[in-house]
Every structure is written in structure tokens, then in C-alpha cells.
Image: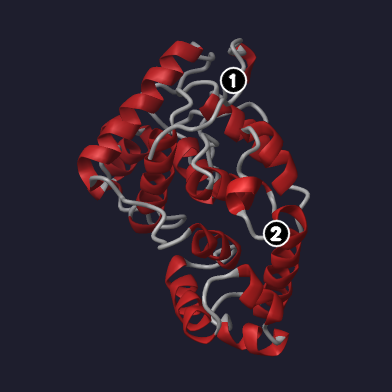
Amino acid sequence: MDDKGNFAQNSVIRESGVWAMPYHESLQPCADHAASHAVSANAQSDLLHKLYHKLLAHYGDPNWWPAASREEMMIGAILVQNVSWKNTVTALHLVRERFGFTFRALREAPLDELAACIRATRFYQSKAARLQAFSFWIEAQCGDDLDRLFARDAIELRRHLLSAPGIGPETADDILLYAAELPSFVIDSYTKRIMRRIAIGPERDTYEAWRSFFMERLPADVLLYNRYHALIDQLGSQVCRASRPLCTACPLKTCCTYARSQSSAD
């Protein structure tokens, strides 16, 4: 993908934004670079790049997001909220077969039938209402013309998306990155878990703090953000699990004190 966005980056990197935590089992932070004092932002940037290249070398290009159209991607971004991608794929297949991936079709769909199609996702009744409300919002904003909607710069478009029904920060950033092809780093639970174990991250544990942490230390590059988020999710779902992580199989184990601590314990 091409980097189409003029994304306003903060040129001043705040040293106070560094998160170097002492070990605590509930958070499981760890890494080569963990210390009692904050490391420099440049060192953090180098580490983030190192982690990315290790993941890319191990997994290859994840070719994410798997969708044939921007509409399908956006619908999937809403359905995947709080549920596995496997269940989301099941729901997407049924929506495609019954209605197709157009916002007009979703607006016209009987709500109970739409809900039945997405039963595999959690909170399917509220998600059906959310999808339909979002489809009406799309019609009101751009008459279903996504080129018109995405003509805004990234900051304005993100603010606009966050005003839409059912769209929170993570879903807005998914849409910005994977549908609008604008550089907006996506944060999720996998990101936080992995980076906590590597003892790198923002001082404040909020979505916006995590997002800013990555975007202030990485270039505003759509392909980099696209792959990095997908690679993190692959690692988090397959290896760096919430309980019983497979540290010996982790491509980041040489950067992770937690992995070494588990090895020593064995």
C-alpha cells in the first residue's frame, strides 16, 4: 500500500513518556532494555524497529487485512470487536451470502436476519444494530462514497470516525489504516501484553498513550503500521498468550527477560 496521508506527527519526543516497569507477575513485563531508569526515545525507536524486523523475518508478510473491498474491511472491523477472527470469518461469510457487503444492503436488512447472520460473534444483537446504525451514518456523511469520506486528512478523518455510532479508537484506527490507507497505529490487547513483557511502553496505560508511543517512535508509514499490527496479533494469538506463553518458540525471546526467566526456572 502507498502512504497517502499527510499525518501530522509530533516532532518533539517526550522522554517522560517512557515506561520502564519493575517486574510484577500480573503484568509480566520483561526485556533486554528493562532498567530502573527510562531509556532514551531513540533507543526505544531502535528496539521497536528491531522487534518488527524479527517478527517479519519469522512470519513473513501477513498480507492483512483479508478483505476484497473497503466495505468488507469496515464491516469486519466492527464484527471482530471482542471476538476471535475465526468467529468473525464465519459471520462475514453469512453476511456475504445473505446480503452482500454494501452499506445500502445493511440499511435495508431486517435487523433480526442480520443478527442471525452474525450470531458467531459476541453480542451479535447489539452488533447488528451497530452495523446498521453505522451504515446509516455512512449514507449521511458521504452517500456511500468512501472516496469522499476518506478525502479528509488523517487527523480529521479519525475525529470524524470516532463520532460514528459503535466506533471506538481501535476500530477507527483499523479503518484508517486498512481501508483509508492512512498511517494510524492500531493498539489492542496483544500489543499491550507483548510490550509489557518487553518492558517498553507509555507511562500512562491508555489507548491514546500507547498509540502515541508507537507513532512518535516509528515513521508514519502505512505498510510498516499495517504489517506491524498484524504481526503483533499473530504473535499474541499463537505464542505470547495471556497464560502459558510459548516462550521457547517466540521469535522475540532474545529480547525478552520474561522468556529468559522462564527458561531459568525450568
Disc assigned to residue 9:
1
Q: In the rendered image of this protein, does residue 73 appear above or below residue 113?
A: above
Q: Earlier in the sequence, mark 1 or mark 2?
A: 1
Disc number at residue 143?
Answer: 2
Within the image, what quadrant is residue 155 found in?
A: top right
The quarter of the rendered structure image containing the N terminus is top left
Task: Return the x and y of residue 246 as percentages of the image width and height.
Answer: 30, 53
Residue 30: x and y, percent? Answer: 43, 33
Q: Is residue 257 visible?
A: yes
Say if 25 sits above or below 208 in the image.
Answer: below
Question: Which residue is painted at 38% across and 23% down in the image?
Answer: 47
> Mark 2: which amino acid?
Gly
Q: Are marks 1 and 2 in contact (CB under 8 Å)?
A: no
SS assignment at label 2: loop
| Residue 48 shown left or right of residue 118 in the figure | left
Which of discs 1 and 2 lies nearer the camera? The answer is: 2
